[in-house]
Image (cartoon, rainbow, N blue to C red):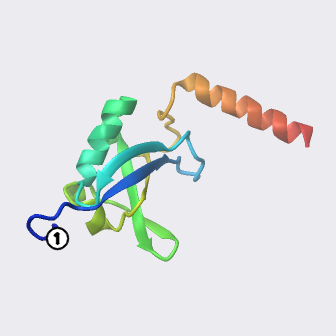
Amino acid sequence: SPPPSGLEAPRLLLLVRAIDWDEWVMGEDLRMEASAETTVRSVLDRITEEKGISRHRIQVLVPGGGRSRRVLEAGDEGLTLRRVGVTDRLVVRPTTKGLRQWHPFSYYEERFVDELSRRLES
């Protein structure tokens, strides 16, 4: 529920982490200011503005109890961050397995080569 009349919802620094379906972190966290009363849809719209990714191609994972997460249904995008249990970190992933769109493709090629080199050296 919104804060009492005359009081502003607390501001927070929200870290948005993009992962793939194998839990691989797809790039740096996206940092944005928000409030507990910011809707999930607003956050998705900001991701669209900053990354050029349609919000319809992003799944939102919210706390599901303990260390687990659950996929937020598309109809729940109007809920606030507070309502879905997000306090400072939001995890998103592509709707399609294997899709990498958080950075240009060259970013992922470079990460793959670096990781492969690191593993071959050890």
Residue 7 visible to an observer of this rendering: yes
Q: On the rendered structure, is 72 left or right of 78?
A: right
Residue at image location 68% in from the left, 27% down from the top: 110
Q: Amino acid at mark 1?
A: Ser
Q: Residues within 10 Å of mark 1 (few under 14, many from 20)?
A: few
Percent across and percent down for residue 77 are 24, 54
Residue at image location 82% in from the left, 33% down from the top: 117
Q: Nearer the viewer, residue 44 or 101?
A: 44
Locate the N terminus and report the quarter of the image it occupies. Answer: bottom left
Q: Mark 1 — residue?
A: 1
Q: On the rendered structure, is 73 left or right of 23?
A: left
Percent across and percent down for residue 12 are 36, 56
Q: Nearer the viewer, residue 16 or 105?
A: 16
User: Can you say whether 4 is above or below 80 in the image?
Assistant: below
Q: Secondary structure at mark 1?
A: loop
Locate the C terminus and report the quarter of the image it occupies. Answer: top right
Q: Nearer the viewer, residue 68 or 43?
A: 43
User: Can you say whether 55 is above or below 49 in the image?
Assistant: below
Residue at image location 74% in from the left, 29% down from the top: 113
